[in-house]
Structure formats: structure tokens, C-alpha cells
Image (cartoon, rainbow, N blue to C red):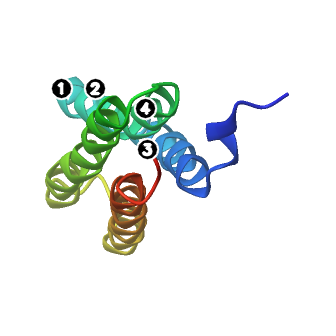
Amino acid sequence: MAFMFENLQVYQKAVDLADQVAALTERFPRGYYFLVDQLNRAALSIATNLAEGNGRFTKADRRNFFTIARGSAQECVPLLEVARRRGFIEEARHGELRADLEVIAKMVSGLINGLDKRPA
């Protein structure tokens, strides 16, 4: 039996993004561990906070974890930009990942806004 959050499209997209980032950063040059680590943590944080938020019982707890997930999506933006500027990511791939992050952030915002429409 799957956990309920595993059926959420935003969760699936977040896991896909984290997997793509992990594969991408494997090719970063030595000496940039700080960037690899931070980018991987931020990307993975999106999915993990969505999962943890869905396991919470109160709206306030859920909102808190969903808000952290949205913040982690936004945290990935400058990290990817630095990687692009350093030549670690091609322009087209950078654009694809940014677009994925934008979609994920909007979907997480929808989850947050949807909390207000649900009964307590």
C-alpha cells in the first residue's frame, strides 16, 4: 500500500527533480562539494518536506512543512544559476530545471492555499 503523498503529482515531480539533480551533480568538478551538497540537499528537501507535511495532523503543521518545501524549491534557483555560470550546466538544461522548479513551486503553493479550503 502506498503512502497517500506518493500519489501527489507534486511529490512525484519533486522526487524526479531530486533524482535529476543527483545525476547532474555527479559530473561537477572536484572542489565544488559545497555546491553539490547544497543543491542536492535543497532539491531533496522539496520531496521530504512534502512527505513529512502530509504526515502531520494539523493544518498549521502541514502548512509549515509545505512552506519549507516551497522555500527549498526557491533555494535551488540561485544554486543552479551559480552552476550555470561556472559552466557545469548547459544553458538548455538549466532552463529545463528552472521551469520544473517553477511548476513545483506553484503546485506547492496550491497545496498551501488548499489547506484553507479544507475543514479543520
- As helix, strand or loop, the secondary structure at mark 3 comes to helix
Residue 106 placed where, x, y %?
35, 66
Residue 119 located left or right of residue 81: right
Residue under pointer 3: 21
Residue in front for this viewpoint, 57 or 9: 57
User: Marks 3 and 2: in contact by CB < 8 Å?
Assistant: no
- As helix, strand or loop, the secondary structure at mark 4 comes to helix
Q: Which label is found at residue 53?
A: 4
Q: Quadrant of the C terminus?
A: top left
Q: In which quarter of the image is the N terminus?
A: top right
**Amino acid type at image mark 4:** Gly
Q: Local crowd at mark 3 within 10 Å, few (<14), some, or many (≥20)?
A: many
**Amino acid type at image mark 1:** Phe
Q: Residue furthest right?
A: 1
Residue 107 located left or right of residue 13: left
**Amino acid type at image mark 3:** Val
Residue shown at 38% from the left, 75% from the top: 92
Residue 82 placed where, x, y %?
14, 52
Q: Local crowd at mark 2 within 10 Å, few (<14), some, or many (≥20)?
A: few
Residue under pointer 1: 34
In three-dimensional space, the C-alpha distance between marks 3 and 4, rounded to whole angstroms, equals 22 Å
Residue shown at 32% from the left, 29% from the top: 61
- From the viewer's perspective, is residue 2 above or below residue 103? above
Residue 31 placed where, x, y %?
19, 25
Q: Which residue lies furthest to the front in this view?
A: 119
Residue 86 located left or right of residue 119: left
User: Taking the image as drawn, is residue 29 in sight?
Assistant: no
- From the viewer's perspective, is residue 72 above or below residue 90? above
In three-dimensional space, the C-alpha distance between marks 1 and 3, rounded to whole angstroms, equals 14 Å
User: Marks 2 and 1: in contact by CB < 8 Å?
Assistant: yes
